[in-house]
Image: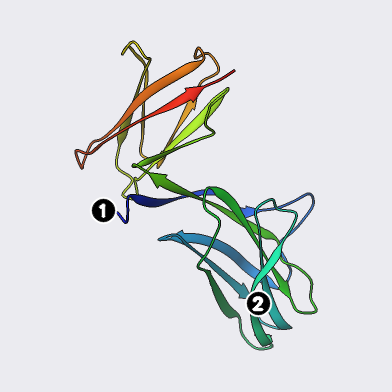
């Protein structure tokens, strides 16, 4: 695994396709998706055969309501005879936040919204929300999908919970934890690496 200035980027797909209210897939599109690689987001979509538009604008938001245009593909888009594939790279997404994207298909309206949350890890982990109330998530680097075990300790050094995952985060229910600071370790089954950190609980 590669570490760059102790900042590791992992991806949590919040929703492969996010819809608001009664929003439906745009009739011109057969797919519209987003993925994260090395801290950049990659959008890809396909315009079905027989559909055309006048340019494509790409929009991004962090609240799903207020969008800003971040890119544009000019000229006639689509084809009357065959499907057309398109892609766009957002090299500067907003870290530790959900990034929402939509397309404006020139003269044909807006697409549905897709979203992705990018977590920036420091010292090998990230806790959100912090401090925790009823629950929190502890994110860590696990791009190989290996089994990891979380152990949580109180300030007296007593283990109060443990959990196992093959994902890149642990979901911790803290509703019954007394308010205070807790220490945790994440141990991997394959690489022998242990991540240590702490989080606070406040009710």
Q: Is residue 160 above or below residue 21?
A: above
Q: Judge left or right: residue 25 versus residue 121.
A: right
Whether residue 12 is visible here, answered yes or no, is yes
Quick one: label 2, few (<14), some, or many (20+) residues within 10 Å? many
Quick one: label 1, few (<14), some, or many (20+) residues within 10 Å? few
What residue is at 37 percent from the left and 14 percent from the top? 155
Whether residue 52 is visible here, answered yes or no, is no
What residue is at 31 percent from the left and 35 percent from the top? 148
Q: Which mark is residue 1?
A: 1
- Measured as percent of width and height from the top left, residue 181 is found at 44, 20
Residue placed under numbered mark 2 in the picture: 48
- Measured as percent of width and height from the top left, residue 46 is found at 60, 74
Dot 2 or dot 1: first in sequence order is 1
Q: Nearer the viewer, mark 2 or mark 1?
A: 1
In which quadrant of the rendered view does residue 29 lie?
bottom right
- Measured as percent of width and height from the top left, residue 49 is found at 66, 81
């Amino acid at each position: 695994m590669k570490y760059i200035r102790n900042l590791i980027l992992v991806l949590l797909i919040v929703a492969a396709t996010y819809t608001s209210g009664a929003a439906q897939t745009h009739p011109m599109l057969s797919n519209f998706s987003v993925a994260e690689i090395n801290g950049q987001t990659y959008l890809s979509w396909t315009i079905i055969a027989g559909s055309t538009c006048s340019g494509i604008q790409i929009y991004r938001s962090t609240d799903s309501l207020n969008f800003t245009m971040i890119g544009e593909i000019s000229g006639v888009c689509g084809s009357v005879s065959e499907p057309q594939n398109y892609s766009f790279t957002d090299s500067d997404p907003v870290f530790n936040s959900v990034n929402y994207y939509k397309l404006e298909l020139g003269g044909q309206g807006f697409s549905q919204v897709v979203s992705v949350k990018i977590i920036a890890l420091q010292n090998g982990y990230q806790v959100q929300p912090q401090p925790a109330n009823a629950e929190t998530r502890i994110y860590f680097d696990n791009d190989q999908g290996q089994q990891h075990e979380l152990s949580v300790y109180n300030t007296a050094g007593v283990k109060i919970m443990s959990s196992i995952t093959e994902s890149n985060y642990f979901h911790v229910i803290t509703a019954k934890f007394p308010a205070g600071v807790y220490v945790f370790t994440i141990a991997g089954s394959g690489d022998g690496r242990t991540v240590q950190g702490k989080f606070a609980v406040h009710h």
